Image (cartoon, rainbow, N blue to C red):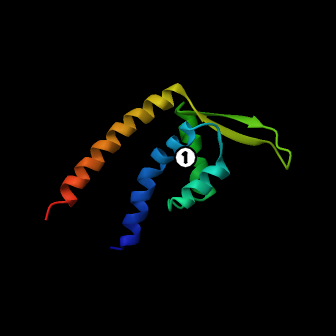
Amino acid sequence: MKVSNTQTQMRKGLLEFCILHIIARGEVYATDMIEELKEAKLIVVEGTLYPLLNRLKTASLVSYKWVESETGPPRKYYSITEEGNEFLASLDETWQDLVKSTQFITSKK
């Protein structure tokens, strides 16, 4: 068993949560999301991000709008829906519980 495989799975599990947080801050372009995720060491490529964004859109958690660009084709900007905000609030609670549980277990000697 390779530790890198487990690390990758851990990152993937957090990806949706982190993407929703990024989008919840305001309208955002996918390339900007990728840059932030890479900066945070949650390495993501377009082939991973776009299917996830489509699933979030299908679930009515995010929406998008096309915005004309001065430097090229129109860009798709994502924003969170009210349902997405409620979903994210539930994920936040779950995250806090998981952090507490993990710290409880990993801090024992």
What is the residue that sits farthest to the top in this orientation?
Answer: 82
Q: Tell me which residue sits at (41%, 60%) in the image.
A: 9
Q: Is residue 3 above or below residue 26?
A: below
Q: Tell me which residue sits at (39%, 65%) in the image.
A: 7
Rendered location of residue 56, percent (x, y) = 54, 38
Rendered location of residue 34, percent (x, y) = 61, 55
Tell me: 93 left or right of 77.
left
Tell me where residue 17 sits by quadrant.
Answer: top left
Q: How many marks?
A: 1
What is the residue that sits farthest to the bottom in this orientation?
Answer: 2
Q: Tell me which residue sits at (43%, 58%) in the image.
A: 11
Mark 1 residue type: Leu
Quadrant the C terminus occupies: bottom left
Tell me: 70 left or right of 46.
right
Rendered location of residue 74, percent (x, y) = 80, 42
Q: Residues within 10 Å of mark 1 (few under 14, many from 20)?
A: some
Badge 1 is on which residue? 52
Rendered location of residue 39, percent (x, y) = 56, 60
Quadrant the N terminus occupies: bottom left
Tell me: 54 left or right of 93.
right
Kind of element beneath mark 1? helix
